[in-house]
Image (spheres, helix red, strand yellow):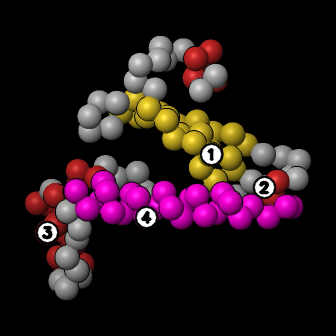
Amino acid sequence: MCGIPFACVGNAHMKHVLKCLKPSFAPPGITTMRTTVLDGLYGEVILKHAAWPTNEILARHLTLTIDGWSNARMESIYSFNIIFPNRRVILLKSEDLSTTTHSGHNIAGA
């Protein structure tokens, strides 16, 4: 994923650009992106998480990243990721923290 909101899929200008780049391509609708595509990516992440090689688990230098955003329903979603020395990124957890105060103390306890 490259950070483009799912809503862009239905945008007329985006459809025009995609049609110019590859006339035979039919982009999925926003509902498909939010369900089928996202569910598929989630499944891939779970499979990768279950198959961590021992050398990555035992790595001495890991980076924990936390990213937060508001989705289309204005829910505060946070993702917690680990970046390994070989630059592989694993999603540890993605959680709706809308009902939690957005303080460092509360986010760290999630």
Look at the numbered discs 1 and 4 and tell me whether their residues touch, using CB distance below 8 Å.
Answer: no
Of residue 20 and residue 96, the one placed in the foreground of this image is 96
Q: Indicate the position of residue 18 as horizontal and vertical percent values.
A: 22, 72
Residue 37 among those drawn in magenta: yes
Kind of residue at badge 1: Leu
Q: Which of the two discs, 3 and 4, sits closer to the camera?
A: 4
Q: Earlier in the sequence, mark 1 or mark 3?
A: 3
Q: Position of residue 13 (x, y in %)?
A: 14, 60
Which range is magenta?
31-55
Q: Judging from the image, what secondary structure is the residue with disc 3 in? A: helix
* Residue 94 point in image, percent of width and height: 51, 41
Identify the residue at image location x=71%, y=64%.
51
Query: Disc 3 marks which residue?
Result: 16
Residue type, label 2: Pro
4 left or right of 101 in image: left
Is 44 located above or below residue 108 in the figure? below
Q: SS class of the residue under badge 2? A: loop
- Pointer 4 or 2: first along the chain: 4
Reading the image, the residue beneath label 4 is: 40
